[in-house]
Amino acid sequence: MLHTASTIKQPPKLRLRPIAEAILGTGYDVTVVFVGKTRARTLNQTTRNKDYVPNVLSFPLTKQCGEVYLCPEVAAREAKNFDLSVNGYLTYLFIHGCLHLKGHDHGPKMDKLEAQYCAQFGVR
């Protein structure tokens, strides 16, 4: 099940449920939260002891439940570097976060899975 929340005024409208189900399964309960730069930085500081504004953070809470935090402001700035629209890049970041919730670490296997899911869901 996918839940969405936002601490920003106009969160983007993205089709994330099919992606969450494909990566995590239908029994996984994931919440995606759209946050501003201040909230993203604070989360990064308090949970990871890192002092920068991240584009995505993911937190597994249990084996069947987790959270993905997306910062649209950062995504808007970075999207052109990946030749993606802002919504396309946010979707890619959600895929990235879900793969972390699934237990994957950065590396060639995760890169391959990201490319697979981006192709499957037409991320542009």
Image: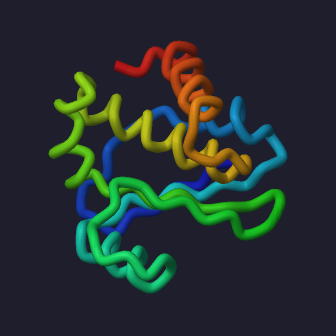
* Residue 49 percent across, percent down from the top left: 43, 82
Looking at the picture, tell me which residue is in the foreground, 73 or 31. 73
Residue at 49%, 43% (x, y): give it. 94
- Side (left or right) of 117 relative to 63: left
Instruction: Tell me which corner region of the image, top left, top right, bottom left or bottom right, holds residue 60.
Output: bottom right
Residue at 64%, 39% (x, y): give it. 20
Looking at the picture, tell me which residue is in the foreground, 74 or 2. 74
Instruction: Tell me which corner region of the image, top left, top right, bottom left or bottom right, holds residue 14.
Output: top left
User: Which color scheme does this rendered protein use?
Assistant: rainbow
* Residue 102 percent across, percent down from the top left: 72, 47
Indicate whether 113 appears above or below 59: above
- Side (left or right) of 77 relative to 16: left
* Residue 67 percent across, percent down from the top left: 59, 62
Residue 34 visible to the viewer: yes
Looking at the picture, tell me which residue is in the foreground, 18 or 115. 115
Indicate whether 61 appears above or below 55: below
Q: Quadrant of the C terminus?
A: top left
- Side (left or right) of 64 relative to 38: right
